[in-house]
Image (cartoon, helix red, strand yellow):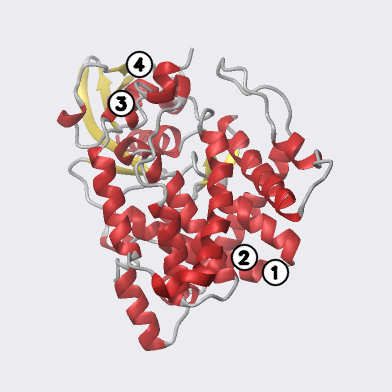
Amino acid sequence: MKSLRELYKIGNGPSSSHTMGPQKAAEQFLQAYPGADAYEAVLFGSLARTGRGHRTDWILKKTLEREGVPAEIRFDMETREEELPHPNTFTLTAKKEGKVLGEWRVMSVGGGAIQIEGQSDPPSAEVYALSTFAGISAYCRAHKLRLYEYVEQEEGPEIWGFLERVWQAMKQAILDGLEAEGELEGGLHIERKAKFLYNQRHMDESAQTRENRLVSAYAFAVSEQNAGGGQVVTAPTCGASGVLPAVLMYMQQTREVSDRRILRALATAGLMGNLIKTNASISGAECGCQAEIGSACAMAAAGLAEMFDMELEQIEYAAEVALEHHLGLTCDPIAGLVQIPCIERNAVAAMRAINALSLANFLTYTRKISFDLVVRTMYETGKDLHDRYRETSEGGLAKLYQ
């Protein structure tokens, strides 16, 4: 598996697969073909159908165009998904005096990661020798390691400095989102709600209601920042970036959890996200929202379990419960925007992660399903979903909303 640096990425929303990935590919393409006098990008699949709402055309044009060098962005609505190597596929072409200098076919596979057809990742990109939870947990038991200690062993001690930057960026996204007001761009007339949720105490507020309100406020804050193009951290994607920061911030503020313990939680959460990314998918276009929000919820539940010093089996169960009960979740963003149902969904998943933690505290040793099994199930379920429910905005809420 690759480093957590390839999972947690600090960047601007609204979509890791639709903006961050294409931008990364375009920057590399410019370096490969700097002498072109024209560039062209053709978007297919989910990128074609939701690219305008997710600002794919905007980021590609912004990245590829230079003074006197135009960039044309085209949307291919005709090519069927089964003809594509990945639902988030696009081509980049460089031309000079009408002749093609070079062409890449790129897959934006989720979380800002890309794969370029015909090019392989360098061997050094592989950091973890083990790529299943069963294998990692057996190793940790044999060597008396906690999961965050295993992460440090594989990544090196410098991983803590990276995770510190990740945590600071997550906190800043929450703080910025709690202060922001007004309507999000895109035409749906969605008002930002994080500040209202944070400040409006219920007249008869119980401890449980307060927890739900604050956790939701933090998740809304990050998700609204993402929808508005602000800076967030992929966890594991931009569209699901509000879940993990929300639960970590809530616990830090209400339980006086140190930054050191937060970083350990981030390491454990990242390891679980890495396992999903490696063995299944974190792409909504490939496997529906279960791959994004479901994965984020599993990461958050595992991180919380680490924060409370739970045993390996309990960490696994928390993550498994969180992912299992998102199986089949569709991705049908209205107007192709990362707003409805995406923003609320982050809040619901954050609360569900806390519920998964509670179940793990009591029921771990009655479980029947492993984390590896539910990851495999999620991947197969996602592949079975009709493509209209995989980030194409052609079904569900996106189709019926008027």
The amino acid marked with disc number 4 is Glu
Tell me the distance, in whole angstroms, between the alpha carbons under discs 4 and 2. Answer: 44 Å
Q: CA distance from mark 4 to mark 3?
A: 27 Å
Q: CA distance from mark 2 to mark 3?
A: 38 Å
Left or right of residue 109, residue 192 in this image? right
Circle nearer the N terminus (4, 3) = 4
Q: Disc 4 marks which residue? A: 72
Q: Earlier in the sequence, mark 1 or mark 4?
A: 4
**Disc 2 and disc 1 in contact, CB within 8 angstroms:** yes
Which is in the foreground here, disc 1 or disc 4? Answer: 1
Could you tell which of marks 3 and 1 lies nearer the N-terminus?
Answer: 1
- Give the amino acid at mark 1: Ser
> Disc 3 marks which residue?
388
- Quick one: label 1, few (<14), some, or many (20+) residues within 10 Å? few
Asked if residue 173 can be seen in this view, the reply is: no
Reply above or below: 26 against 11.
above
Name the mark on residue 258: 1
Label 2 to label 1: alpha-carbon separation: 6 Å
Q: Secondary structure at mark 2?
A: helix
Q: Are marks 3 and 1 in contact (CB under 8 Å)?
A: no
**Which label's residue is closer to the chain start, 2 or 3?**
2
Image coordinates of residue 44 in percent, x first then y, are 27, 25
